[in-house]
Image (cartoon, rainbow, N blue to C red):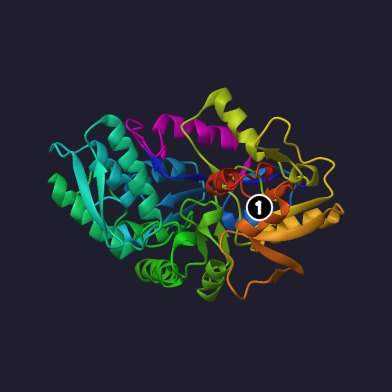
Amino acid sequence: MKGKKLIVVYHRIGDTTCDYNRIVVNRDVFISQLDYFQEKYLVLSLDELQNYDGESDCIAITFDDGYEDFWTTAFPIMETRNIPVTVFVCSGRIDQSDEMWMNEIIRMCFFHSKYVEKIHLDFCGNNVALPLKSADDRVKTYNTLRRMFCQIGNEKKKQYIESIQKQLGLSNVGRSEYRMLSSTQIVELASNKLITIGAHTVSHPLLGELDEIDFRTEIQASIHSIERISNKKVELFSYPFGNINSYNDKIIQVLQSCGIKRAYTVENRALYEDEYDYTIPRIYMYNVEGEALESYMDLGDKNTDEDKDRYFGMGENDKLVNIDKVLIFGIGQNATAVANRVLQKNIKIIAFVVSEKKEQERTFMGHEIWNISEMIKYAKEEPIIIKNNQDFRIVEKLSKMGKNKVHWWI
């Protein structure tokens, strides 16, 4: 029997105090996690794991974003153990003193000293006032800015950040612990045989929410920048945030046109034998160790055909059993994978559902394409399947429109 293949993703190794984004793993915990990986798995590079066909369970380690503490803390530990690692770098913060926007909005909302009741932004021609008076106000404003910044390109993000910093009297020089890799460090890392450098966009947007011009720029510019600095061909890419909104067929086509051979998501499971090269799952690593780590990594020990047919729904009695027909959300690679499994089980596909249907989008895999309103009108009580369990916005939207039989296929 072939061994399981797992890939894990880290972001920062350091002080976990005020880790609002849950991206930091403590140094000692990181060491204990490496101990666990080396004891239980064969630790391989991504390329080695891709080609591995043995019986032992194996694991590959990746880092996203490109924080400087990979250079100062994480890699020295890994190098002494001869552990290979892939680092996916956001090119927009290389050699810069400011913070990535996800961290900067935390600094702006929670760590400024100037008393300001509201900040004002010109958003799509409208003056938007965001409160900062109370602790609850700051949390709400943080969440609003995070959602907003996910959906806009790099230049617009810069404008908003500069405007808010000015209103709050904040310097654009970020906190040292959130500093990113320098070009000099990237050159030295790229020359190490244990390290592979991949691309991770310019500014860490939610690619699927951007216009085509913006997501094309984010992908192409990041790849070209990293290739120029490292003097090496970039063939691997990881999607910021890694959920189903992070990619679509057009985004994948851009990656392919840029010479990217494989792209990685975030989904807590092992790889399937027939894994699609542009939606390879990785397990998100938190600050856990001991029994909690063992329990958490059990999430990844699922790659059999039986495991492919596990679902969970929105209610205790909402099980996908004795179903003879379904709707499938989306028309991309994930939807194709679900459709093929559904058809193998002799379940009829009523239609594919999309958030917004374009005029030219009439059929997919020989079945009709509906928008959500059409689905609610004609098939409110039929089950609908979503491939990715992180896409809660779709679930929330469907629920608000009266759709209650929603299932994730995990």
**Quick one: 76 or 91, which is closer to the camera?**
91
Residue 40 seen in the figure: no
Q: Quadrant of residue 362?
A: bottom right
Single out the residue that lies furthest toward the top. 291
Q: Name the residue under label 1.
A: 376
Q: Which amino acid does label 1 sit on?
A: Ile
In percent of width and height, residue 262 lies at: 58, 63
- Front-lying residue, 53 or 315: 315
Does the image show residue 221?
yes
- Residue reaching furthest right? 346
26 is within the stretch colored magenta = yes
In the image, residue 19 lies in the stretch drawn in magenta: yes
The answer to whether residue 302 is left or right of residue 396 is: right
Q: Quadrant of the C terminus?
A: top right
| Side of 61 where 372 appears, left or right | right
Image spot of residue 40 (x, y percent): 64, 35
**As drawn, 397 above or below 114:** below
Image point 14% across, 51% down: which residue? 166
Callout 1: helix, strand or loop?
helix
The number of numbered badges drawn on the structure is: 1
Q: Residue furthest front?
A: 377
Residue placed at 32% from the left, 61% from the top? 92
User: In the rendered image of this protein, does residue 304 appear above or below residue 123?
Assistant: above
| Quarter holding residue 162 | bottom left
| Residue 141, above or below 186 | above
In the rendered image, which quarter contains the N terminus?
A: top right
- The magenta span reads 14-42
Instruction: Answer above or below: position of 403 versus 156.
Output: above
Position of residue 276 measured from the top left corner of the image (x, y, whole percent): 66, 60
Q: Residues within 10 Å of mark 1 (few under 14, many from 20)?
A: some
Give the x, y percent position of residue 155: 29, 65
Identify which residue, 394 or 52, lies in the foreground: 394
